[in-house]
Image: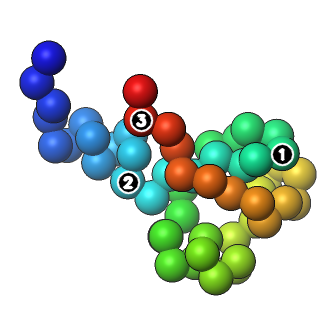
Amino acid sequence: MAKIPEAENRLFKNVFVCRRCKTKIRAPTLKVISGKVKCRKCGSRALRPVRKK
């Protein structure tokens, strides 16, 4: 199956998942690393990149 760059960017670029409540959040990588972004649902700052299957 061919990888389409537009679809890859839409699904994986700047998308993070909350480690506590598993909510998806789209935010710039540098802000997530510096801890300026928190989850809208639970308020946690523990985020990880979305997993590519």
**Amino acid type shown at disc 2:** Lys
In the rendered image of this protein, does residue 44 appear above or below residue 52? below
- Residue at left 62%, top 53%? 48
Q: Which residue is situated farthest in the right direction here?
A: 42
Q: Residue 51 appears at what percent x and percent y?
A: 50, 38
Quarter the N terminus occupies: top left
Q: Residue 30 appears at what percent x and percent y?
A: 51, 78
Mark 3: secondary structure: loop
In the rendered image of this protein, does residue 35 appear above or below residue 27? below
- 40 on left or right of 42: left
Mark 1–mark 3 Cα distance, whole angstroms, equals: 19 Å
1 or 2: mark nearer the eye: 1
Closer to the chain start, of discs 3 and 2, is 2
Quarter location, residue 33: bottom right
Dot 3 crowding, Cα within 10 Å, few <14, some 14–19, many 20+:
few
In the rendered image of this protein, does residue 34 appear above or below residue 20? below
In the rendered image of this protein, does residue 21 appear above or below residue 30? above
Q: Are marks 3 and 2 in contact (CB under 8 Å)?
A: no
One can see residue 37 in this view? yes
- Residue at left 83%, top 45%? 20
Residue 13 is marked as 2
- Residue at the spot of label 1: 20
